């Protein structure tokens, strides 16, 4: 089972994601913005990062760039949680080094299916 | 796996309310001529979160409404649309609307907000009017469209050619992972094309030089295969063709290159390799995020809340306060164990240590009490935050220019006190807007800046919180107040009143100076109700005013309703408690200061005013030490805006007492606001000054000031 970093400034989304992942047996590290996520990622080597795009302090795209600059996170899967209205963010996310995306709104089953896709 | 999403609803509601507050205050701070991009970002983020959450948790009405709001915000954010006052107003309206939607969901009621559709149409009309850049929604399935028409015809298998970009690894997309995913659909044959590999000395170990041909023998839709490559399709060469009879596994070159592929995987990834996935046998359908995002998630059925269920109100407490508390408890445990040890084997030799322990215990208790109190304390900004909007809306509707200043927003007070002071504050602010601040023309005429200022100020002062509402408006008109008071029979002709007594008339029941019933005042809630509400909280409200310069309303409140600074008093054998805040002074009574009013009550001449005397012994029908006035002490207290002197036998200690409700434990008793348990275990009643005044009937008399040195406008 994997250690997953869930980054979202919305507490309810974080809770939902975290609850779902823990239910599937994963360990979850939570962060409320990119800055926090970066610190947590340095503290704990995680296997997968799930990050919201729009966040205060440091947004998701910057987070991806910052993570990719760390030797330990060169190849770690990073998924962006995007919404339809920010479709262009997918491309930006890819350019920043994101692995893929999960379109909001998603339900727990979709989340788990995507996680499975990444972790094999 | 099915997860009940309703467990997250409460958190979602709370964060939505917070987000809406953020939006509102940011919108109110927006200067259309000078848009600060961070402010817009903040508003956008809040709307975006609400939209995302409401979509996720199945509140589709909120999601679709917020979507148009967000779209317009996005245009403003990207600079393709100018923001105008009208748009700001529309946003404010939509904030209200979303808040009401959320409240209805929160209460488990069916959502019916008539103006929602109207506001949404207004947004759509604005959005469809040129000026804006192309904000056509990107269909999430566009990502797949490059791979040609998605024919969903299933075939017996697929032949896939996949050449990813060199940097595919750097986005964490490991081709091996995709192949394993394909393998979970059916038997898979992989052939690597290594023709692009550079000479060994110039290989970049992190780049991917390979391309693959994959034969998948599985009876699945093409879209299922496309989905595997969803995240890399834009940067890769990908063809997916139905498997023809010519493509068979044995035609493909030897599989010997497969180990090469494995070597391409960076070592970090190899560590967490799992054995190849056996064909998926679990029945969970592979859900395409792209396809399903368009299907609204089914709202989990929201059960209307059982009305009889007690509302549990929650409070968010800073972690530092909780840490403090845990520290205190730790200290307490240490003290307890120390005392416990002493008790096991006590001899008189250890008396000093016992006393030390008790001293420590009382300190622990005090600190613990303070910490626990602090948990219920919230910054007053929670109440102040509604005012920018209120002032903005009212000043616009009244054609006045008003600037609102808020000071001391971080001043903390008890949550319950805060909840109960909200309405009186709103009333006072409305009053300042309506009667205080003049129209811009009038202000210019009287040589003031045309923008009026209302200041909300909060600060702590000796165990109380003081809230001031200060305006630089017209001030109270003494002449008109007196006229009104005489009309209403509050003042007799020929009464000479000092300025502050005249000002104070506005708090008397049945008094209103609003010439016409405007939208703002004249709602039946007068200043008398404001004062009564504040008095019920053991607080006081006063007004100071200078005609032409403005008024200041000052509210004083205890920091908490649970604990009271009390003065213990004794009458006969009984101990009562007076709220310390209400005591003006205590004096020894002398014959020369006492006056008897025929048919009335006893009066105390205190410097230049007469103060009625209340005998507790006669009210509570108990026997005092002595029957003569001179035997006792007089405590002068203030309540209901009049002073009274209470005759008692003796003053005892001052101490903090924990207030217990008499109503909950017994029944309401006139003149008593609650009870407490003293150190010796006896119950003592806490006196309610305004109740005592009513009981004694002393307020029926008018007491004039003795001096007539004050100039009184009559």
Image (tube, coloured by chain):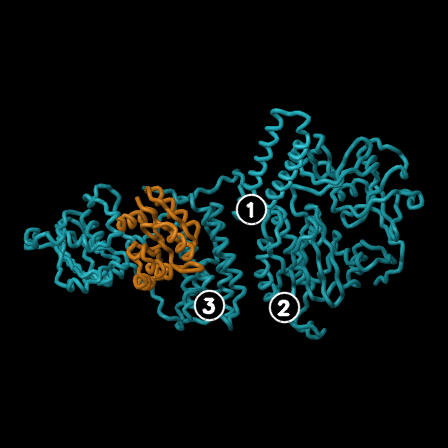
Chain colours: A orange, B cyan
The chain letter under disc 2 is B
Above or below B308: residue B199 = below
Say if mark 2 contacts mark 1, CB within 8 Å: no
Say if mark 1 contacts mark 3, CB within 8 Å: no
Work out how far the residue at label 2 is from the one at label 1, CA to CA, in angstroms: 43 Å
Residue bearing mark 2:
B400
- Name which residue lies at 59% across and 66% down: B396
Where is residue B44, by image quadrant?
bottom left
Q: Earlier in the sequence, mark 2 or mark 1?
A: 1
Q: Image check: B331 left or right of B60?
A: right
Say if mark 3 contacts mark 2, CB within 8 Å: no
Residue B643 point in image, percent of width and height: 81, 48
Is residue B224 visible to the viewer in this orientation of the structure? no
Residue bearing mark 1:
B321
Q: Are the residues under marks 1 and 3 on the same chain?
A: yes
The chain letter under disc 1 is B
Above or below A107: residue B713 = below
Check the picture and name the quadrant holding the C terminus of chain B. Answer: bottom right
């Amino acid at each position: 089972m994997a250690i997953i970093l869930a980054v979202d400034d919305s507490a309810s989304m974080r809770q939902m994601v975290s609850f779902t992942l823990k239910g599937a047996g994963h360990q979850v590290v939570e962060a409320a913005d990119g800055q926090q996520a970066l610190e947590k990622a340095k503290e704990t080597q995680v296997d997968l990062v799930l990050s919201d795009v729009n966040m205060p302090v440091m947004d998701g795209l910057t987070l991806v760039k910052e993570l990719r600059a760390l030797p330990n996170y060169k190849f770690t899967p990073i998924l962006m949680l995007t919404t339809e209205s920010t479709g262009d963010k997918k491309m930006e996310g890819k350019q920043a080094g994101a692995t893929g995306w999960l379109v909001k709104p998603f339900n727990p089953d979709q989340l788990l299916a995507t996680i499975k896709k990444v972790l094999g | 796996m099915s997860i009940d999403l309703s467990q997250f609803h409460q958190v979602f509601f709370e964060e939505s309310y917070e987000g809406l507050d953020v939006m509102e205050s940011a919108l109110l701070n927006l200067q259309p001529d000078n848009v600060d991009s961070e402010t817009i970002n903040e508003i956008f983020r809040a709307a975006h979160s609400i939209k995302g959450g409401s979509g996720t948790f199945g509140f589709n009405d909120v999601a679709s409404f917020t979507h148009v709001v967000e779209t317009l915000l996005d245009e403003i954010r990207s600079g393709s649309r100018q923001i105008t006052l009208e748009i700001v107003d529309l946003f404010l309206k939509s904030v209200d609307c979303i808040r009401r939607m959320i409240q209805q969901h929160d209460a488990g009621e069916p959502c019916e907000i008539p103006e929602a559709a109207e506001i949404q149409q207004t947004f759509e009309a604005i959005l469809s009017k040129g000026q804006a850049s192309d904000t056509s929604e990107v269909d999430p399935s566009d990502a797949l469209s490059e791979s040609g028409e998605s024919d969903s015809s299933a075939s017996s298998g697929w032949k896939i050619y996949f050449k990813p970009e060199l940097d595919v690894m750097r986005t964490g997309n490991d081709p091996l992972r995709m192949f394993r995913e394909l393998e979970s659909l059916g038997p898979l044959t992989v052939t690597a094309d290594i023709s692009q590999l550079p000479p060994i000395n110039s290989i970049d170990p992190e780049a991917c030089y390979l391309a693959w041909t994959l034969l998948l023998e599985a009876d699945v839709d093409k879209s299922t295969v496309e989905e595997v490559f969803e995240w890399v399709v834009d940067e890769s060469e990908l063809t997916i063709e139905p498997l023809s009879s010519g493509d068979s596994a044995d035609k493909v070159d030897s599989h010997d290159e497969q180990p090469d592929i494995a070597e391409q995987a960076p070592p970090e990834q190899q560590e967490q390799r799992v054995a190849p996935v056996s064909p998926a046998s679990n029945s969970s359908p592979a859900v395409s995020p792209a396809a399903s995002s368009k299907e609204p998630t089914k709202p989990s059925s929201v059960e209307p809340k059982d009305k009889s269920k007690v509302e549990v109100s929650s409070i968010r407490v800073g972690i530092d306060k909780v840490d403090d508390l845990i520290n205190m408890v730790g200290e307490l445990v240490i003290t307890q164990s120390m005392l416990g040890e002493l008790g096991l084997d006590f001899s008189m030799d250890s008396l000093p240590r016992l006393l030390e322990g008790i001293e420590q215990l009382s300190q622990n208790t005090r600190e613990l009490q303070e910490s626990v109190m602090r948990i219920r304390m919230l910054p007053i900004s929670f109440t102040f935050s509604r005012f920018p909007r209120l002032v903005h809306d009212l000043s616009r509707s009244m054609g006045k220019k008003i600037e609102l200043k808020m000071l001391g927003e971080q001043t903390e007070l008890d949550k319950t006190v805060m909840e109960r002071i909200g309405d009186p504050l709103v009333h006072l602010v409305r009053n300042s807007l309506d009667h205080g601040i003049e129209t811009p023309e009038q202000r210019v005429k009287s040589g003031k800046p045309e923008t009026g200022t209302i200041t909300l100020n909060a600060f702590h002062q000796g165990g109380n919180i003081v809230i001031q509402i200060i305006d630089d408006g017209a001030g109270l008109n003494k002449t008109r107040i007196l006229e009104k008071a005489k009309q209403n029979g509050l003042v007799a002709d020929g009464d000479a009143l000092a300025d502050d007594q005249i000002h104070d008339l506005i708090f008397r029941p049945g008094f209103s100076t609003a010439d016409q019933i405007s939208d703002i005042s004249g709602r039946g809630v007068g200043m008398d109700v404001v004062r009564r509400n504040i008095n019920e909280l053991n607080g006081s409200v006063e007004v100071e005013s200078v005609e032409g310069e403005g008024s200041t309303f000052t509210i004083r409140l205890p920091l908490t309703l649970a604990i009271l600074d009390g003065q213990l008093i004794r009458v006969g054998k009984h101990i009562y408690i007076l709220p310390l805040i209400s005591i003006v002074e205590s004096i020894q009574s002398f014959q020369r200061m006492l006056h008897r009013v025929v048919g009335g009550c006893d009066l105390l001449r205190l410097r230049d005013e007469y103060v009625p005397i209340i005998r507790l012994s006669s009210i509570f029908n108990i026997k005092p030490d002595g029957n003569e006035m001179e035997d006792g002490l007089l405590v002068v207290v203030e309540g209901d805006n009049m002073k009274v002197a209470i005759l008692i036998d003796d003053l005892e200690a001052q101490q903090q007492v924990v207030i217990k409700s008499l109503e909950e434990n017994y029944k309401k008793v006139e003149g008593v606001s609650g009870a407490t348990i003293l150190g010796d275990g006896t119950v003592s009643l806490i006196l309610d000054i305004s109740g005592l005044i009513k009981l004694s009937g002393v307020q029926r008399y008018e007491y004039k000031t003795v001096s007539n040195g004050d100039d009184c406008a009559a």
